[in-house]
Image (tube, rainbow, N blue to C red):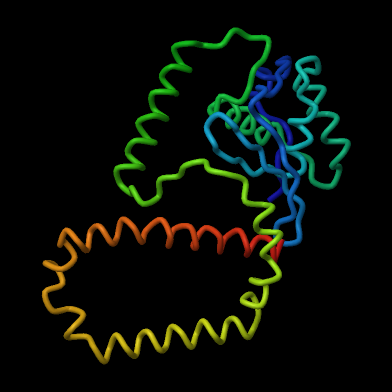
Amino acid sequence: MTKTLLSSSWYRVAALKARLRPHAVLHRQRFRGQTWYVLQDHHSGRFHRMSPAANLIICLMDGRRSMQEIWELVCRRFPDDPPTQDDTIGLLGQLHASDLLQGELAPDLAELSHRSDQQKQRTLLMKLRNPLALRFPLIDPDRFLEATLPMVRPLFSLVGLLLWLTLVVVGVTLAAMHWEELTSGLTDRVLAADNIALMFLAYPLIKGLHELGHGYATKVWG
């Protein structure tokens, strides 16, 4: 089905002159062989992936050009697959909902307050549902990853895969051989005070290794 470029709602935003808030930054990345752009919100820590056309729209939003001018420029830049007016309206709505957009119109403080309260409630519910997914900003590990990558790179190979499969098979076999000992009085042992203390001590180490795995994977495969 052919996309419809025009939108009956375009008149609502055509004259708008908007720009990003200072805490929003764009990054260029390669993802599965394609170029994408990631919009980072330094205030909330959230990331938004943008297409090249959406990235160009955002880059042209300098507070002086109208959305009509920006849309026409982007359509000329991407003649084979231009963004529709509905796509552009959706992008503006996404930026506005994330409080990343500022323009010549006075902001609706009541709406912004309501949106902020909703975001706080969603964040609280997420933490209550999955406390193990809590995230705390620490340090930038890029230098450490670069320095230690040669030692870890062999794990991201066929040999590394075979070693991992061997470890899994051995672990499953040993668990099956000692199943009764592992499951006997499991509830009482898990809730024992010394075991809970060990879990608190082991979790940061396991979580750290898990996150380093993500970091090394992105270094190896880009």
Where is residue 177? Give x, y as percent: 26, 92
Quarter of the image where one finds residue 54: top right
Residue appearing at x 84%, y 42% in the figure: 78
Taking the image as shown, residue 81 lies to the left or right of residue 40, namely right
The quadrant in which the C terminus is found is bottom right
Does residue 152 lie above or below 80 as drawn? Answer: below
Where is residue 215? Give x, y as percent: 61, 58
Does residue 62 lie above or below 110 as drawn? Answer: below
Return the residue nearer the eye: 34 or 196. 196
Residue appearing at x 77%, y 52% in the figure: 35
Does residue 208 lie above or below 76 as drawn? Answer: below
Residue appearing at x 34%, y 42% in the figure: 127
Taking the image as shown, residue 178 lies to the left or right of residue 161, namely left
Return the residue nearer the eye: 25 or 91. 25
Where is residue 179? Give x, y as percent: 22, 85
Residue appearing at x 33%, y 49% in the figure: 130
Quarter of the image where one finds residue 17: top right
Q: How many marks?
A: 0
Where is residue 204? Give x, y as percent: 41, 56
Return the residue nearer the eye: 87 or 211. 211
